[in-house]
Image (tube, grey):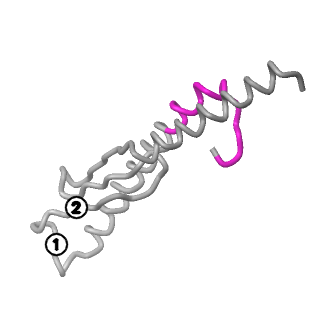
Amino acid sequence: MDKRMLKQAQELQTKLMKAQDELENATVEASSGGGAVTVVVTGQQAIRSIKISPEVVDPEDVELLEDMILAALNEAMEKARELAAKRLGSLTGGLKIPGL
């Protein structure tokens, strides 16, 4: 590997590390039930918070609350995956790199 290719590889690695750090700090939000359940997830798909409006907590209908939480989580995770693909895809030229 010549010096130019090595330098390019090192620059790419630096950019990828920076993008991963940015994803760790970036957040996406999703809600369900008209805002009754809100989930915040990082760009690296770590759940930061779940907020549930007290009025939707019904001991007689726990299944509805579970469905709203699941819907909000799934939407937030999809948004996080899209954010990561957008940020990292521009660096990797669309290559699928395991672990990214």
Q: Position of residue 36 (x, y in %)?
A: 18, 57
Mark 2 falls on what kind of element?
A: strand
Q: Nearer the viewer, residue 69 or 4?
A: 4
Displayed quadrant of residue 4: top right
Which mark's residue is nearer the viewer, 1 or 2? Answer: 2
The residue singled out by tag 1 in the image is 57
Real-space Cα distance between discs 1 and 2? 12 Å
The amino acid on which the numbered mark 2 sits, given as a three-letter code, is: Lys
Span colored in magenta: 84-99
Q: Residue at x 32, y 69 (%)?
A: 66
The furthest residue to the front? 3
Q: Residue at x 45, y 47 (%)?
A: 24
- Vertically, is 63 above or below 30? below
Specify the label residue 26 is tagged with. Answer: none
Q: Nearer the viewer, residue 44 or 75?
A: 44
Q: Residue at x 83, y 22 (%)?
A: 3
Image side of residue 83 versus residue 62, left or right: right
The furthest residue to the right? 1
Q: Position of residue 31 (x, y in %)?
A: 27, 50
The residue singled out by tag 2 in the image is 51
Image side of residue 51 versus residue 20, left or right: left
- Indicate whether residue 95 is drawn in magenta: yes
| Circles 1, 2 touching at the beta carbon (< 8 Å) | no
- Indicate whether residue 15 is drawn in magenta: no
Displayed quadrant of residue 96: top right
- Vertically, is 40 above or below 94? below
Image side of residue 53 versus residue 9, left or right: left
Q: Position of residue 28 (x, y in %)?
A: 35, 44
- Vertically, is 78 above or below 55? above
The quarter of the rendered structure image containing the C terminus is: top right
